[in-house]
């Protein structure tokens, strides 16, 4: 066997088409407008730093060190980007961090640590706006918290009895990351959620998004302040309820609709209730009526519920939507389970499981930038799936890498122009 070597052939030729698409989206301009100015003596621009960071996940890597150990040789003579060292990327990213806020609830004894980053929030919204996502006819927001287990020097014990962070994440239209607030592990989802949502809607207002179509959240959002805010900022909201708060209403439901799901037979009904009467009067607000959707399922063990005196398990959702049928509301709320899929993608495809920094605020920078890579991936896979028959917009990034990114190419200079030579007869790009 005779082997002919060439140091200029790259195994990840498809990333060049990704870079070209990002240039067409004017990502470089968005980066420069949203992030602090770099020194004129800086060897690398924000474009170099971000494109290098994005290429880690688009070329099959899973940590910053992959830039030096695995990717740098493949980006020699690349006209789109100059690859910096991992230390340079981390140093620049750490400069974007903001101060951590520490506070306590009125009656609490636990110090809660939170971190927000307005610059990166604006950068993310600018990317979504450029991609046309914020201009969608209907904006569906989902809010939830996830645990990122880690042993960083400032991480605290979570309710899962292990150390980590518990960031609050809001998604847009079930596939884009809209807002992130990093919280330490000992901060429950309920504490200071009203401040988180105020920051979220304040950021949206800067992009002329005054009201969202639908907002869904779990039982941690069943609070007077949160419900009142969502009633103002969204057309319709759907909030899960803890049974201890609303189980007194379950026996009032008379009309039940029978259906089935993956777990068996289910019954759905609804009534109109007036919650938070005392809190509303304390704040000088007239108590409002909302719809309480109730779902129940027969217990397998046949045990009797002490409150309702029957053999059912109950689940409830509070909403201001009186237009949908009971089944439509139930099915629509169930779709917020897609949040778990998004967390799975962020943790396993875009590095959330391997935080590079040792502090809460610096790791929020990483969470935001990797989430922006995730948002751009949605745009990229939808764009290229229209041009390549062997791509599907539902592909996870691993399959995209195998079918599109891994492509032997070589940059050559011809007639004073840089041209991309592809060593494949199966690559089809319309």
Image (cartoon, rainbow, N blue to C red):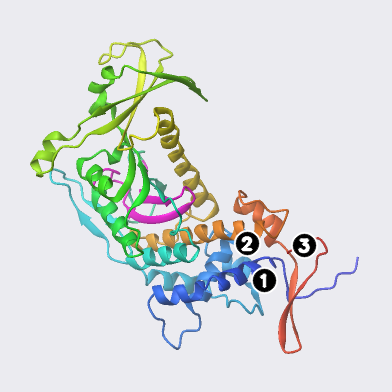
In magenta stretch: residue 168: yes
Q: Position of residue 234 (x, y in %)?
A: 32, 48
Tag nearer the camera, 3 or 1:
3
Q: Secondary structure at mark 2?
A: loop
What is the quadrant of residue 256 in the picture? top left
| Furthest-right residue in this view | 1
Q: State the SS at label 1.
A: helix
- Are discs 1 and 2 less than 8 Å apart at CB? yes
- What is the crowding at mark 1: few (fewer than 14 residues within 10 Å), some, or many (at least 20)? many
Magenta residues, start to end: 162-191
Give the image location of residue 307, x and y in percent: 25, 16
> Magenta segment: does it hold 259?
no
Q: CA distance from mark 1 to mark 2?
A: 10 Å
User: Taking 58 as reference, is 145 above or below it?
Assistant: above
Q: Which mark, by number, is residue 427?
A: 3
The picture places residue 179, in percent across and down from the top left corner, at 38, 56
Q: Residue under label 1, please give it.
A: 74
Q: Which mark is residue 428?
A: none
Q: Give the quadrant of residue 379.
A: bottom right
Write the residue at 65% across / 55% down: 400
Going from the N terminus, do you reach mark 3 or mark 1 first? 1
Q: CA distance from mark 3 to mark 1?
A: 19 Å
- Of labels 1 and 2, earlier in sequence is 2
Q: Does residue 98 appear left or right of residue 376 in this picture? A: left
Instruction: Confirm whether residue 143 shows in the render.
Output: no
In the rendered image, the vertical position of residue 247 relative to residue 423, given as above or below: above
Q: Which residue is mark 2?
A: 59
Residue drawn 53% across and 67% down?
53
Q: Quadrant of the N terminus?
A: bottom right
């Amino acid at each position: 066997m005779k082997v002919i070597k060439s140091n200029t052939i790259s195994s990840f030729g498809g990333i060049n088409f990704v870079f070209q698409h990002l240039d067409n989206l004017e990502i470089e301009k968005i980066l420069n407008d949203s992030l602090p100015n770099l020194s004129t003596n800086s060897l690398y621009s924000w474009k170099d730093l971000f494109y290098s960071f994005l290429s880690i996940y688009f070329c099959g890597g899973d940590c910053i060190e992959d830039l030096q150990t695995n990717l740098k040789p493949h980006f020699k003579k690349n006209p789109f980007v100059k690859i910096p060292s991992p230390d340079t990327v981390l140093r620049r990213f750490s400069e974007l961090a903001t101060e951590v806020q520490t506070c306590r609830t009125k009656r609490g004894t636990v110090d809660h640590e939170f971190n927000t980053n307005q610059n990166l929030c604006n950068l993310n919204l600018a990317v979504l706006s450029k991609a046309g996502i914020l201009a969608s006819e209907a904006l569906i927001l989902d809010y939830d918290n996830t645990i990122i287990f880690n042993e960083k020097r400032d991480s605290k014990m979570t309710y899962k009895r292990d150390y980590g962070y518990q960031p609050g994440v809001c998604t847009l239209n079930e596939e884009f990351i809209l807002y992130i607030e990093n919280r330490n592990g000992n901060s429950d989802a309920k504490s200071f959620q009203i401040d988180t949502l105020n920051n979220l809607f304040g950021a949206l207002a800067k992009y002329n998004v005054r009201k969202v179509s639908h907002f869904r959240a779990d039982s941690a959002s069943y609070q007077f302040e949160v419900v009142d805010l969502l009633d103002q900022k969204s057309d319709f909201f759907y909030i899960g309820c803890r049974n201890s708060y609303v189980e007194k209403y379950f026996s009032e439901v008379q009309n039940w609709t029978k259906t089935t799901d993956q777990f068996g037979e289910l019954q759905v009904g609804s009534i109109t209730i007036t919650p938070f009467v005392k809190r509303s009067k304390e704040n000088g607000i007239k108590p409002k009526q909302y719809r309480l959707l109730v779902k129940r399922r027969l217990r397998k063990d046949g045990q009797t519920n002490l409150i309702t005196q029957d053999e059912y398990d109950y689940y409830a959702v509070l909403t201001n939507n009186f237009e949908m049928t009971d089944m439509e509301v139930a099915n629509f709320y169930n779709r917020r389970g897609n949040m778990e899929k998004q967390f799975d993608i962020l943790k396993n495809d875009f590095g959330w499981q391997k935080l590079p920094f040792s502090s809460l605020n610096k790791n929020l920078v990483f969470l935001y930038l990797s989430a922006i890579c995730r948002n751009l991936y949605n745009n990229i896979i939808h764009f290229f799936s229209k041009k390549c028959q062997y791509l599907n917009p539902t592909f996870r990034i691993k399959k995209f890498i195998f079918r599109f990114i891994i492509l032997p190419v070589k940059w050559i200079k011809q007639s004073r122009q840089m041209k991309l030579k592809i060593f494949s007869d199966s690559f089809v790009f319309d």
